[in-house]
């Protein structure tokens, strides 16, 4: 691949091109098992892109078993052409069954990405929604597994975060194998958002939590405030009603208490908080800051700063597990974590 002066318009897919080229070099024998792989900075210069893009490409190679990364040491090739030649029986899944709580905007966007990738495998897709009914969810999963289907599901929102603050976003399972999990590091996303609000001059920040699974957000929010050495009254977490109205009502109360920074658990809640801030005559981001979670079309339309959960990466990690199950004959019992980014806009 020739070096690029700048990334193309579809740069979010550039890491796929880099992944493909590096994978071909490993498969061709240019890098053998035990060889050190080029470091991130070398690959960044070679492909003329960013560290994040290279990191995403390397993460996919790690997930598929081509390389292993060691903190502070480097990256080693672990793929063996000889070992790969051993034939393995691939499972024959009749279809992939996706089980979601509902088809809100985030789930619909994730579904679209997963469906598009599964059809290239190819693997037929069925979709079911349980509307928060846990008994129905378990029944759908049991029925799919008994039918031999590969199950891709989002854990119930009542589930808490892992000890480090990452929440399970997607799981891949089949009847005979362990479950592969894809986690979103909500705590890291919250820490970045709090840092951004503090950098914009806000010294009292509120976390607005609508119904759902947000323990990771709470942990990251609290940890970042503590790490900055701020007094206890610098931050507060408040429950709010759902949607735009819930966010607006909660923000009005907190504005009266002197809070000018708002991290909201959804873009809808953030849209309500933004409306309350503007009704109070405050300018964003100068006098107040509002940050949502989801990076949905609503956030883009309102020019709302939002924590991006990385739906493309979530879909890619899930499909990598599917491909491993098809190619290796068993579903890998693994957990991978996606770290959210922040899309910074006018708020």
Image (cartoon, grey):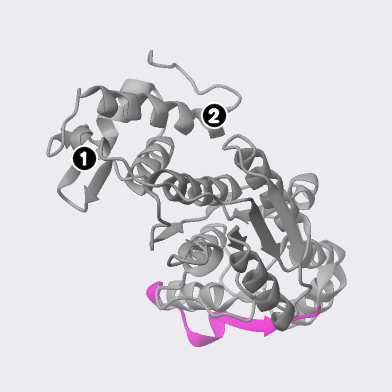
**Residue 332's disc number:** none
- The magenta stretch is 227-241
Crowdedness near tag 2: few (<14), some (14–19) or many (≥20) residues, C-alpha within 10 Å: few
Residue 346, x across and y down, in percent: 70, 47
Q: Which residue is mark 2?
A: 11
Crowdedness near tag 1: few (<14), some (14–19) or many (≥20) residues, C-alpha within 10 Å: few
Outermost residue, left direction?
34
Q: Nearer the viewer, residue 72 or 30?
A: 30
Residue 14, x across and y down, in percent: 49, 28
Q: Residue at x 56, y 51 (%)?
A: 93
Query: SS of the residue at dot 1?
Result: helix
Whichever of callouts 1 and 2 sits on the residue coming sooner in the sequence is: 2
Outermost residue, top direction?
2
Q: Which residue is mark 1?
A: 83
Asked if residue 230 can be seen in this view, the reply is: yes
Does 33 appear above or below 298? above
């Amino acid at each position: 691949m020739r070096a690029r002066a700048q990334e193309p318009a579809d740069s979010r897919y550039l890491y796929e091109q880099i992944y493909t080229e590096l994978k071909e070099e490993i498969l061709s024998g240019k890098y053998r098992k035990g060889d050190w792989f080029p470091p991130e900075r070398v690959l960044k210069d070679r492909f003329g892109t960013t560290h994040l893009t290279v990191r995403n490409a390397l993460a996919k190679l790690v997930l598929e078993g081509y390389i292993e990364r060691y903190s502070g040491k480097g990256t080693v090739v672990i793929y063996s052409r000889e070992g790969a030649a051993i034939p393995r029986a691939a499972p024959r899944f009749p279809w992939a069954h996706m089980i979601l709580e509902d088809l809100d905007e985030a789930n619909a966007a994730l579904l679209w990405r997963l469906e598009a990738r599964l059809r290239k495998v190819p693997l037929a897709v069925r979709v079911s929604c349980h509307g928060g009914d846990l008994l129905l969810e378990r029944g759908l999963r049991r029925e799919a597994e008994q039918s031999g289907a590969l199950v891709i599901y989002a854990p119930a929102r009542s589930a808490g975060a892992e000890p480090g603050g990452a929440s399970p976003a997607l799981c891949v399972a089949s009847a005979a194998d362990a479950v592969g999990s894809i986690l979103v590091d909500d705590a890291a996303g919250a820490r970045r958002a709090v840092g951004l609000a503090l950098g914009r001059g806000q010294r009292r920040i509120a976390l607005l939590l609508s119904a759902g699974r947000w323990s990771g957000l709470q942990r990251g929010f609290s940890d970042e405030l503590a790490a900055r050495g701020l007094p206890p009254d610098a931050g507060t977490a408040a429950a709010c009603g759902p949607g735009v109205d819930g966010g607006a009502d909660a923000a009005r109360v907190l504005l009266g208490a002197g809070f000018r920074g708002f991290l909201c658990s959804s873009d809808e809640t953030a849209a309500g908080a933004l409306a309350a801030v503007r009704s109070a005559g405050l300018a964003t981001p100068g006098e107040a800051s509002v940050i949502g979670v989801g990076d949905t079309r609503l956030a883009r339309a309102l020019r709302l700063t939002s924590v991006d959960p990385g739906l493309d990466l979530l879909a890619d990690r899930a499909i990598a597990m599917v491909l491993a199950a098809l190619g290796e004959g068993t579903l890998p019992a693994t957990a991978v974590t996606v770290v959210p980014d922040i899309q910074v806009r006018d708020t």
